[in-house]
Image (cartoon, helix red, strand yellow):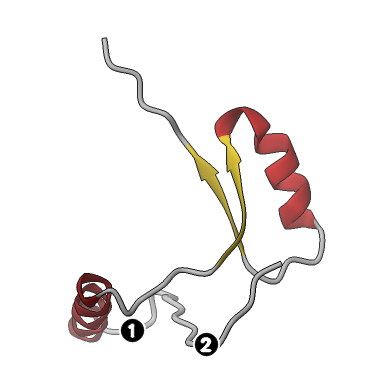
Amino acid sequence: MCSIAKKAVIIFTGLAKPAQMASEMTIIAELAAAGTLVPVTGATYPMDHSAAAYQQVLGRKVCSTVITFTSHTA
């Protein structure tokens, strides 16, 4: 379960004008660079457990569910 001290929700619907979206993305990038933007995740699953991640999403979820990928180098 996740805990949230302060909450801000950002939703991109595609309805905003490109200039507005660019401005908002700039603000988000600045917050991330400053370390003040913290993503809230409820669960993290490796790719080989994606079925369990899907079940998590189907249930009543509070936070985001993340699937991680491992890159393989040749």
Looking at numbered disc 2 in the image, what kind of residue is underneath it? Answer: Lys
Q: Mark 2 points at which residue?
A: 7
Q: Nearer the viewer, residue 25 or 33?
A: 33
Who's the residue at 41% across and 75% down the image? 12
Q: Nearer the viewer, residue 56 or 13?
A: 56
Who's the residue at 82% across and 59% down the image? 59
Q: Which of 30 and 58 is in front in this view?
A: 30
Distance of label 1 from label 2 (alpha carbons): 22 Å
Numbered marks: total: 2
Locate the N terminus by quadrant: bottom right
Q: Which of 38 and 56 is in front in this view?
A: 38
Rendered location of residue 54, percent (x, y): 71, 45
Who's the residue at 72% across and 55% down the image? 57
Does 39 sit above or below residue 21? Answer: above
Looking at numbered disc 1 in the image, what kind of residue is underneath it? Answer: Ala
Q: Closer to the N terminus: mark 1 or mark 2?
A: 2
Helix, strand or loop at mark 1: loop
- Say which mark, if any, is on residue 24: none
Does 2 sit above or below residue 48? Answer: below
Rendered location of residue 71, percent (x, y): 36, 26
Image side of residue 49 versus residue 21, left or right: right
Classify mark 2: residues with Cα within 10 Å, few (<14), some (14-19) or many (20+). few
- Say which mark, if any, is on residue 16: 1
Where residue 46 sits, quadrant-wise, is: top right
Pointers 1 and 2 in contact (C-beta within 8 Å): no
Rendered location of residue 55, percent (x, y): 78, 47
Image side of residue 48 versus residue 55, left or right: left
Classify mark 1: residues with Cα within 10 Å, few (<14), some (14-19) or many (20+). few
Does 51 sit above or below residue 12? Answer: above
Helix, strand or loop at mark 2: loop
Who's the residue at 80% across and 66% down the image? 60
